[in-house]
Amino acid sequence: MHHLTTRALLLLLLAVPLFIAATFVRPLLALAIGYVLLMVGAMVLDAFRAPRAAAIEVERRNDSKLSLGADNPIFLHVRARLPRTLPVVARDEPPDEYDVSQRLLEGEVRPGQTLSLRYTVTPHARGDYAFGNATLRWPGPLGLIVRQHTFALAAPVKVYPNLLEVRKYDLLARTGRLQELGLRRARVFGRGTEFERLREYTPDDEFRQISWKATARRGKPIAIEYQTERSQTVIALLDAGRLMRAPIGPLAKLDYAINTTLLLGYVAGLRGDYVGNLVFADEVMSYLPPKSGRAQFHRLLEVLYNIHSQPTVPDYRRAIAYLKVRRPKRALVVLFTDLASGSDLSELVSAMASLRPRHLPMVVTMNDPGVLALAQQDATSSAAVYERAIAEQLLDERRLVLDQLEQRGILTIDVPASKLTTAVINRYLVLKARGLL
């Protein structure tokens, strides 16, 4: 397919004054017609000499598993078997549901080289999607026409929980910089005496962890890292009821819970622990028995990537009863749920309390920044006073339920969604370091 360029249109418009002048000066008519014929001939020549689509290759490169709520890079690689540099404009077809950083991509393909055009997509829902084709435009050598061709690049893609956070954790863990994620090194109180490895000393390390021989040999402070007890069990329970579909920013509460579950499973797996998962609403939706190893992380990923909230009330008793039958041995049971105002949460308290003392139960919730802001606002009008009173009541009811859980020996975490992953991982590391799992 060919299109005229702006240059061609402007050159054609130059013929208009000639035709107008020809109405007064007849000899100019032949000049005007000749000019138009010359331009048409130039356009035909330009179209003929424009590179054919067969000389151009376009390839899309992206992760087969995109991360939810993250900027995922997408690359279009363009190659041309031509002796000259070719300017191109590309338009890809990502799924309509994605946020796209840039629709039109421009660049120059040089002889013997590959042009990489980059943009990012941000998915806001997990599941199965598909990319469409990619369309490329390039000009003829005279710049009068552009040739357009659509390259068949349609391909399926899956949106998973945020894998970029897992990769970031892996990178920072290898370089001893986990504090950049807000993760604290858990001090080991009389536990973990088995040597694991030597690494650079950090301010969070105890003085007694310094290896003086290694420090003298390497010329810088070196610490000994001890291995804590392994082969313990962590099971994440995900409430997929109607309240977990409530949005906080761009993601639903369930999405934050799934992202945290995934990183918790990854971290626990690295430490040799068994990781399991149970998803439920009014009935159990899926159950992944606890296992160790890297393969278990991929199983967890496959279970979670296409889980969606249900328009039902969660049945805590049924979920806990199901778990106790299938996992009688001790485990850290982490429940991600929501505390609805006005709901009877006695079932939540009694169901989680029934896990003790065999298991170590923990309830994780996300507080609403909007409610916190209303409760802390300066009330300058009757409407503001009413809003603040309602917000304070909601916070009091929430605190009451959390207190009831803690009184029954159930650990709790109640933080903003943005701090959820850090809070849960830190608590897990502390519990493990203290030998409480």
Image (spheres, helix red, strand yellow):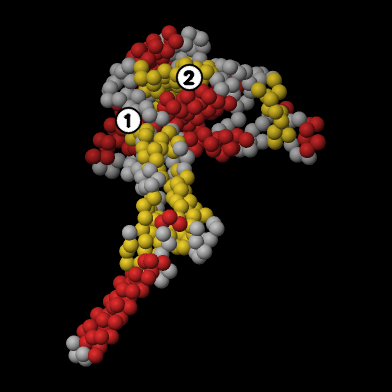
Give how far across and how far down residue 363 sits, in percent. 43, 21
In screen coordinates, is 435 left or right of 131?
Answer: right
Q: Residue at x 47, y 40 (%)?
A: 63
Of helix, strand and loop, which one carries label 1?
helix
Q: Which residue is mark 1?
A: 245
Residue 297 placed where, x, y %?
51, 26
Residue wearing tag 2: 276
- Image height check: is 237 above or below 325? below
User: In the image, 7: left or right of 196?
Assistant: left
Image quarter of the N terminus: bottom left
User: Label 1 sits on what residue type?
Assistant: Arg
Q: Quadrant of residue 139?
A: bottom left
Q: Residue at x 32, y 67 (%)?
A: 4
In front: label 2 or label 1? 2
CA gap, disc 2 to disc 1?
23 Å
Residue 39: % across, % down: 32, 76
Q: Nearer the viewer, residue 353 or 137?
A: 137
Name the amino acid, label 2: Gly
